[in-house]
Image: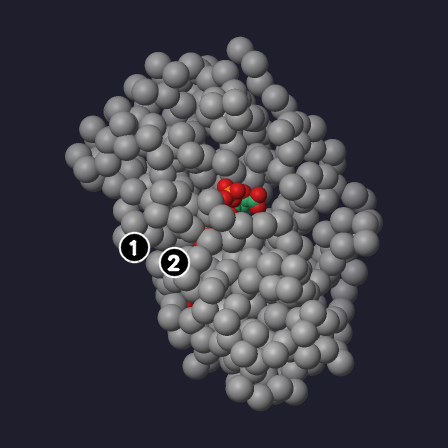
Amino acid sequence: MELVTPHIPPQPAAPPSRLNNARVLKVELGARSYPIRIGKGLAANEAAFPEAQGRALRVITDSNVAPVYLAPLLAALHIGDDQVFVLPAGETQKTWDSAGQVLDWLLASRLSRDGCLIALGGGVVGDLAGFCAAIYQRGIDFIQVPTTLLAQVDSSVGGKTGVNHARGKNLIGAFHQPLSVIADTSSLSTLPRRELLAGLAEVIKYGMLADSLLFEWLEANLDRILALESNALAEIIERCCAIKARIVGLDERETGSGPRALLNLGHTFGHAIETHTGYTQWLHGEAVAAGLCLAADLSARHGWITEAVAARCITLIQRAGLPTQPPPGMTAADFRDLMGLDKKVQNGKLRLILMRGLGDAIISSDFDASLLDSVLHDACSAAG
Ligand SMILES: NC(=O)c1ccc[n+]([C@@H]2O[C@H](COP(=O)([O-])OP(=O)(O)OC[C@H]3O[C@@H](n4cnc5c(N)ncnc54)[C@H](O)[C@@H]3O)[C@@H](O)[C@H]2O)c1
Ligand SMILES: O=C(O)C(=O)C[C@@H](O)[C@H](O)[C@H](O)COP(=O)(O)O
Ligand SMILES: [Zn+2]
């Protein structure tokens, strides 16, 4: 059995600094280091955007976010609504075609290389706007203003940008770090319930892959999160961003044996589900939730985690109102076909992120293929 176990050193002891009421963490990437500012009301506060001052700015957002959060942001940035591109909302917009439309608009608006894009929205807007920033005139600056739980705990941090392809999730993209991440926690109050739960899937993922204490905290405090208690939401955003910042700081570009691939726990399965369903039926977090259950099951069948640990993971996902099984009608063959295009494939061999303990994930290139087959077959049969 060959397991690559990237070492994740403990968190630095220095406490994060504060900016007024904001909590500030930092992604340490040398000259490309940047702050993550977390707090209520930040997206309407000029002081949260020092990196934007004196710059030509363009805002990319979507049709659900714009009516609620655009005007206060424009006021804070002192720009008009003629500097805004509004995408239709939803995962189906995360395409090459949408990127082309944004790039056409940027050129038409004559933005020069010293300009800066602002991504106001969830992970779809963040990934798409970040990708456009990465390739527009060979790369311009951008700032993430995440408005979903998923984007605040995960997608706005780390510089993975890109679009989907009919053959697979995020298959076209670039690494491009933002100048800053401004996570305004008050925006979560308008988030639809289903979107909140989808974000929780990534939070549970962090506990499963890197932090057993976070996982236990989630087991004890899930009801507070589901009740949108602001202290509980702030707690998970900070803890998840701290984990992500640390891992990205160690392995920005997801090298072969570095720890960043661990953030993909559940995703090889989840991305196959999203692609199979045409990015229309399952939210990213929902697909990841089912993928986390498959990863836990496969890890347990290898004997790398106990049945009891796998059951705790699946129970927490179920308690969070998330799917624990693949979509009805999807087959093991569908999974195998789609997983073959996963970006972690090396020399034609699939690598999976699996668990060897609660809060302890591994990259495995040598899992037992017959166990994978039986996990997929059992799960697909149970889903119908
Ligand atoms: N780059 C990364 O590291 C990374 C990490 C995780 C996920 N992702 C990507 O992120 C995407 C999913 O992001 P998402 O879950 O944020 O989805 P999303 O961007 O589609 O947003 C979810 C929905 O909520 C709406 N919305 C956003 N903010 C709102 C608010 N405050 N109030 C009311 N409605 C609001 C949006 O219009 C949309 O309809 C996927 O494409 C996934 O692949 C990327
Ligand atoms: O930041 C990362 O690295 C992640 O893997 C975070 C994931 O939650 C996210 O969905 C990411 O977009 C997946 O990346 P991909 O490389 O598998 O497309
Ligand atoms: Zn994800």
Question: Position of 379 compared to 138: left or right?
Answer: left
Question: What residue do we see at 57% from left, 35% from top?
Answer: 261
Please say if 205 is above or below 373: below
The reply to whether the residue tagged 2 has its Cβ within 8 angstroms of ligand 1 is: yes
Note whether residue 313 is visible.
no
At which x and y percent is residue 44?
61, 80
Question: What residue do we see at 56% from left, 62% from top?
Answer: 132
Badge 1, how many Cα within 10 Å: few under 14, some, many 20+? few
Q: Secondary structure at mark 2?
A: helix
Question: What residue do we see at 38% from left, 70% from top?
Answer: 88
Calculate the distance from the C-alpha at mark 2 to the C-alpha at mark 1. 7 Å
At which x and y percent is residue 45?
66, 79
Location of residue 314 (image quadrant): top left
Please say if 44 is above or below 322: below
Q: Nearer the viewer, residue 327 or 87?
A: 87
Q: Nearer the viewer, residue 19 or 96?
A: 96
Badge 2, how many Cα within 10 Å: few under 14, some, many 20+? many
Question: What residue do we see at 20% from left, 28% from top?
Answer: 381
Q: Secondary structure at mark 1?
A: loop
Residue tagged 2 = 91
Residue tagged 1 = 280
Residue type at mark 1?
Thr
Identify the image quadrant of the C terminus. top left
Residues at discs 2 and 1 in contact (Cβ within 8 Å): yes
Note whether residue 165 is visible.
yes
Location of residue 50 (image quadrant): bottom right
Please say if 43 is above or below 249: below
Q: Nearer the viewer, residue 151 or 196?
A: 151
Residue type at mark 2?
Glu
Q: Which callout, 2 or 1, points at the residue further toward the start of the chain?
A: 2
